Amino acid sequence: MTNNKITDYVGQPIFTQVLSLIDGPLIQSACKTHQADKFSRKLCFKDHLTTMLYYIFARCTNLRAVEAGLELCNGKLNHLNLKKVPARSTLSDGNKKRTSDVFGTLYQSLYQKYKHIISDSLLKQSIASKLYILGYFAP
């Protein structure tokens, strides 16, 4: 990463910029710790994470909306590092079978990595009410 962060992200969608902050080694470590891919044949943890982050960013209300939204992005899935759009049934199975602890571990790793640049000042209530925290993803 260069010192000029502005030019690093020119032309990249915000969602892609957020994904770029999540290092592969952090994902692999959380996955290995919780054996998150042990029983997964169709949906690896990294793809599950990307899809669930899309779920939040796109303000989807169900898995059908996630699948439809990602289908619309089909030509640009390489920006999300997805090879194909996961089916609703695959996402539902992933949400049921994969423990939420792996997402929590990844969140803690990201927090440890970036806590020095996160503001510790109190947010105004109007801003704080618009923030989302990743947690358990219900199908």
Image (cartoon, rainbow, N blue to C red):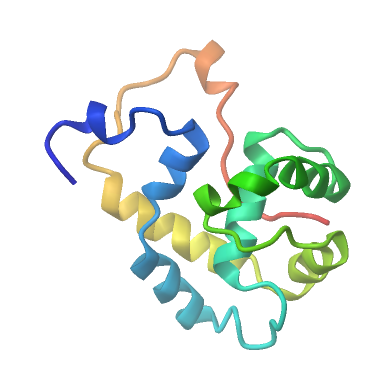
- Residue 21's place in the image compared with 34, above or below, is above
Where residue 99 appears, as percent x and y from the top left, is: 66, 72
Count the marks: 0
Give the farthest residue toward the bottom. 38
- Residue 56's place in the image compared with 52, above or below, is above
Where residue 62 appears, as percent x and y from the top left, is: 85, 45
Left or right of 136 in this view: 19: left
Left or right of 117 in this view: 82: right
User: Which residue does the image show at 61% across and 73% down from the upper left?
Assistant: 44
User: Which residue does the image show at 54% across and 53% down from the upper left?
Assistant: 78
In terms of depth relative to the viewer, which is nearer, 54 or 86? Answer: 86
User: Which residue does the image show at 59% across and 21% down from the upper left?
Assistant: 129
- Residue 16's place in the image compared with 49, above or below, is above
Left or right of 9 in this view: 30: right
Give the farthest residue toward the front. 75
Give the farthest residue toward the left. 3
User: Which residue does the image show at 19% across and 46% down from the upper left?
Assistant: 1
Rendered image quadrant of residue 130:
top right
Where residue 39 appears, as percent x and y from the top left, is: 69, 87
Left or right of 83 in this view: 90: right
Give the quarter of the figure containing the C terminus: bottom right
